Image (cartoon, rainbow, N blue to C red):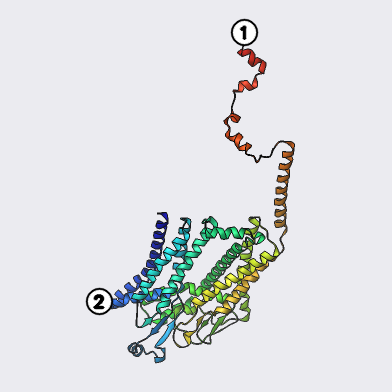
Amino acid sequence: MQRLLVALLAAFDAAIAAAVGLVVLLAPLTLLWTLAFGATADWGALWPLTGTLWQFGHGAPVSVEISTEVLRTAGVAPDAAAFTLSVTPLALLLFTLLFAARSGARAARAGAWLLGTLAGTAAFAAIATLVALTSHLDAAQVPVAEAIVLPIAVYLAGALCGAVRAVWDDGDGGLIDRLHDLMDTWGDWTPVPAAAVRGAAFAVLAVTAVSGIALAVMTIARGGEVVALFQAARVDALGATVITLGQLAYLPTLLVWTASWLAGPGFAVGVGTAVSPAGTQLGVVPGIPVLGLLPENSSIWMLIVVIIPIGAGAFAGWAVRSRLVWEDTPLGTAPRAVIAIAIGAVTAGLAAVAALLAGGSLGPGRLAEAGPAVLPFALALGGEVLLGAAILLLSPRNRDELAEERTDRWIAEMSASDLVAARDRGFAPAIPDDGSAAASHSDPSTHDTAPLGDLTEPPSAHRDSEDPRA
């Protein structure tokens, strides 16, 4: 019954995750429909648009086709009638990922992590399939396969990460425990995988935090440009609210762009453009307010910012090394070198996935290329993190670390020698292996008590007091 309950709760969590994501899109769209169109609104297009945006938020590309009437009314060139949007607003994807990780961890703590993960993913897959089959728009089409597979892949990845993370520490009595026991036989190489994952997490969090600070600084420095673009758009309060909400959905995407700029390769905002510390080459930029944060020019001296990802790697190496010292598992040079390489490789893999989602097509014409390039960003960030982690992990151990290790070893050796000496003198006899010790503890006669008077009085006095002739 408990396993059935875990499966039902995991499926309920998946349904909540999908429902919240859809409601977050449906609520403002409903308000927009009401205020902008009123009684003449085409309410039949509200749900298909919501489902299309939900799929787009999970990484599915959208093929947009503008009708001839709209082109003629808006004065748009005919060559811009069809284009693809593939730069994902990562806010919705991150929400699903984190919610799935929470659900997977909860199923792991309940003792059925695999069942909970599969049940939640199956429920989310059913909802994703229903959304894909019922949300069809002629003007904005999403491939059915990608509309179904990509949201499921996001939820499954989050649930697996959350469940495995919880089970690795608590155990599951099954596959993860057998893998854990197998790794325990590796000797000095046992802590390498866990240390590598921990270090990569520290590195990614550090890079994300610094990217957020850099983006905030640019917002303060170039906030006037953003306000000017808002004013140039000539939108009312409702339009400004819709634009602001859309830009907030792209905030994690902008963090990826900022991280690519800090790593060195930078990013593009159109074919033939480049925004990097080495230089900025921009042509005509769309009048999207958030693009007012783009720097107008830069100097080759700005390449010094690559020290920041190296510092993030050094922070990750320090965190891993401190944990190894605290756990009293100092490693040799080879295991520490493998940990540093693994930290760089995992960071590069995550950067590649982030660049793949945060890059692509942003519109028609020259906007068909936007965001960071996958391979340069992954190699640059992974190499810089590797360098920083190697500096901390492969540097010679300092005096305090060696002194602490020698002190722990001396305490262990002295404790062992004192125990041996005490046993030799008869103060600490060895516990026999024949079960006599256990028998003496279980025999109540060995624990009989006597009155204190019987122990303090001499035997003769005790016998005299009992003699009736005394």
Q: Is residue 341 above or below residue 45?
A: above
Residue tagged 1: 469
Q: CA distance from mark 2 to mark 1?
A: 121 Å
Residue 36 relative to residue 177: left or right = left
**Looking at this rendering, what residue extends furthest in the left direction?**
39
Quarter of the rendering containing residue 72: bottom left
Please name the residue shown 73% across and 46% down the image: 414
Residue 425 image offset from top left, x and y in percent: 74, 36
Residue 48 image offset from top left, x and y in percent: 34, 76
Rendered image: mark on residue 39:
2
Residue 272 image offset from top left, x and y in percent: 53, 87
Please name the residue shown 37% across and 77% down the image: 239
Quarter of the rendering containing residue 91: bottom left
Q: Earlier in the sequence, mark 2 or mark 1?
A: 2
Question: Which residue type does callout 1 highlight?
Answer: Arg
Under circle 2, the secondary element is: helix
Q: Quadrant of the N terminus?
A: bottom left
